Image: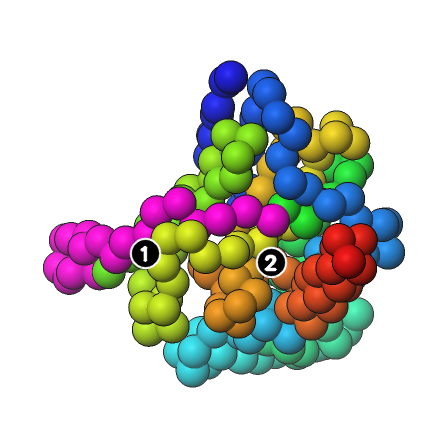
Amino acid sequence: MTRRAMRMGGGIERARVDGERPDVWALTQRDYERVLPIGATGEQYGYFWGDSDVLFQRAGLSLLVTVLTVNNFPYIAVPACTFFLWAPVALAARRNSKVRSAKYAGLWRAKVLACEPIETRGTSSVDWMFNLLIGDDSGARVPLKVPLKAEYADINVGEDVELIVTSDDPDFYTFQAIREAYLPYLDVWVGEYPFLERRGMINVSDRIASGESRESA
């Protein structure tokens, strides 16, 4: 059996399995759009809003462009004066579109195979990162490396973990994993960027878990 994991751009990790089918539950188109929306979610807006320094820079740029264009190009001045408000929306929509190119989406139910904090040294500081290896019995493997957070301390090997995956293969023997993981029993999210609409993800996760329980009863 061949096992592969390859880092891709735009927030996805590609996995391929030549053997047993991964434990992926296909999503409807409605659920696909619900968990991976084109428009900015609240978490994404906050991510791109940035801190006070970023806000000050955007507001200053908005003011400068407005002053330069208000007399000769009033149609530019209007959107320019609100640039600092809609810029996070545009940035989030652009990033979201990069992970929605595949035809199918599914919920991959996997396990934590390895996890550890690691120290990384930069030119002038020491940062801590968190390594997480996710996989299932099919041999599919997806590694995540994200900035360390306090809530990751409760994550242990063997924990259930879920990711949204996309593919042009309806059986998901080859898929791209969105680089944001959800651990349902810990209610912990692992990722550097909030790709998923979290309330939608939780609803989909709960519904699939309930359906599986009814089938096994």
On screen, residue 104 versus residue 152, left or right, reads: right
Residue 1 lies, in percent from the top left, at 51, 17
Residue 86 lies, in percent from the top left, at 67, 72
Front-lying residue, 26 or 84: 26
Q: How many marks?
A: 2
Q: Residue at x 55, y 75 (%)?
A: 46
The overriding secondary structure of the stretch rendered in magenta is strand
The amino acid type of the residue labelled 2 equals Phe
Quadrant assignment, res 211: bottom right
Residue that protrudes farthest toward the front in the picture: 217
Front-lying residue, 76 or 2: 2
Residue 37 lies, in percent from the top left, at 74, 59
Depth check, mark 2 against mark 1: the one in front is: 1
How far is the residue under mark 2 from the one under mark 1? 18 Å
Position of residue 92 relative to residue 151, above or below, is above
The amino acid type of the residue labelled 1 equals Phe
Q: Which residues are magenta?
A: 109-127
Position of residue 182 relative to residue 23, above or below, is below
Mark 1 burial class by Cα count in 10 Å: few <14, some 14-19, many 20+: some
Front-lying residue, 130 or 147: 130
CB atoms of marks 2 and 1 within 8 Å: no
Which residue is under mark 1? 130
Residue 157 lies, in percent from the top left, at 37, 53
Q: Is residue 73 visible?
A: no
On screen, residue 169 versus residue 7, left or right, reads: right
Dot 2 or dot 1: first in sequence order is 1
Q: Quadrant of the C terminus?
A: bottom right
Question: In the drawing, what numbered circle is on residue 195?
Answer: 2
Q: Residue at x 32, y 56 (%)?
A: 130
Element at label 1: strand
Mark 2 burial class by Cα count in 10 Å: few <14, some 14-19, many 20+: many
Q: Residue at x 53, y 79 (%)?
A: 59
